[in-house]
Image (cartoon, grey):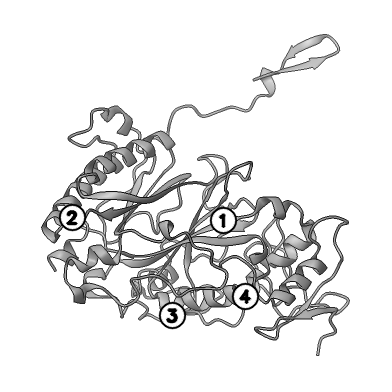
Amino acid sequence: MRPTETTGITKTTGITVTTESNGGPHGFSRRRLIASAAAGGTGVAGAVAGFGVGRGGLTARAEAAPSRDLRGANGSVTEPFYAPHQAGVETPPQAHAHFLALTLKPGIKAAEVTRWLRLLTADAAALTQGSGPLADSEPELAHEPARLTVTFGFGPGLVKLAGETSVPTWLGPLEKFPIDDLDPDRCTGDLLLQICGDDPLTLAHARRMLWKDSRNFAEVAWQRDGFRRSYGSQGEGQTQRNLFGQLDGTANPGPGSEDFARIIWGQGTRGADPVFSAHGEPPDNLGAHLPEWMRGGTTLVLRDIAMNLDTWDQADRPAREFATGRTLNTGAPLSGADEFDVPDFEAVDKRGLTKISAASHVARARDGFGPETQIHRRTFNYGTGAGEEAGLMFASFQADIDRQFLPIQRRLAEVDLLNEWTTPIGSTVWAIPPGIKEGEYIGQSLFEG
């Protein structure tokens, strides 16, 4: 048995928690954090040319200013709209997002919904390719699509209009977790529009056009703007940071990989020589339970997670890293040196103390799970915490909620040191229909299949 410096044992799991320092003189230290977690068993959360003054006065420093590419190269970039899968899932995340949940007006029938979906499909297809819709009075605002995508999610109320038997059992509210403090107004909706792009003006225009299509059929249930690093701030393929400064999404399956095909779309590519991540080979049947109208689609659990930046500021850096199980600067697990090193949950330091706490976020989210228990997190920050709410729109895509998302969420809700600073305030579940061919409309497989 490894020697450890024990400060407490959680009542719910029996996990022995260890610490390595007392931290700073103020705020949270690792010792205080673990004592708090052990006492309560749970927390409150889920799963970055001018002038200079010299001796001679003002001196121009234009020669030191970095060169800027002002050619608008990204403005003309488009993402495919017509494809086997909807864009906005496997698409490399854009800089901005708007989540718009809509509730059907009373008395709306299936025929009216299909007319609405045809209209939305046609206008979303035009907008994402840089063209204004037919009724667009400002089409110039659509001419720089900047990787605009529109992803449609269906709630149970909309699916039910196609017939009671069309609604899968998992399409509804999640079970209640002890860490949740949910606002009922953020836990509803019949249709979700996830609108993403690299230009906020283009995105705002798209949101307005799609709302004009919708206002005769639905009302706004809730909406939320989100952001990541601005386009060009860092190289493509780099993991984004959330408002806590943590790299967020390190363990995601790679777009275009066999892992992604199985974990998100629920079926393999049948490639001759598939390559799998350190998690191992995921099963090829995760999408077998999906109804026929969803084949080529996936599921989305969308959690609105409030982040308490004020109390996070009170924690010293060792406490933050101890709670996460990763370093803040590189994102490496505390047992490794690189962001993508596989965490070693058995590793001990020179004193024989466990490097990664069994109650840390990375341990609770990964340790002991099989290769099927993986998700694709597509997250966006919101707010600043400077007199306004701040948090994370946590979009979790997976083929099977029961086999993939829920096992992780249950463990995080039971014990996770990061729960000290986070609280889920919104939660919705969506069916993501498959992509379509030109001439079809989103949801055609549901209403005409």
Residue 211 in percent (x, y) is at 28, 43
Q: Quadrant of the N terminus?
A: bottom right
Label 4 secondary element: helix
Query: Label 4: which residue?
Result: 364
Q: CA distance from mark 1 to mark 4?
A: 20 Å
Visible residue check, residue 440 = no
- With 313 as the anchor, is 246 left or right in this view? left
What's under tag 1, amino acid-wise? Ala
Q: Nearer the viewer, residue 368 or 26?
A: 26
- Residue at the far bottom in the pictured view: 1
Which residue lies at the image location 43% right of the left edge and 30% below the top edge?
72
Q: CA distance from mark 1 to mark 2?
A: 35 Å
Which residue lies at the image location 75% right of the left edge and 70% below the top edge?
36
Upstream in the sequence, badge 1 or badge 4? 1
Query: Label 3: which residue?
Result: 403
Query: Label 2: which residue?
Result: 441
Residue 429 in percent (x, y) is at 38, 66
What's under tag 3, amino acid-wise? Arg
Upstream in the sequence, badge 1 or badge 2? 1
| Disc 4 + disc 3, Cβ < 8 Å | no
Upstream in the sequence, badge 4 or badge 3? 4
Numbered label attached to residue 306? 1
Rendered image quadrant of residue 387: top right
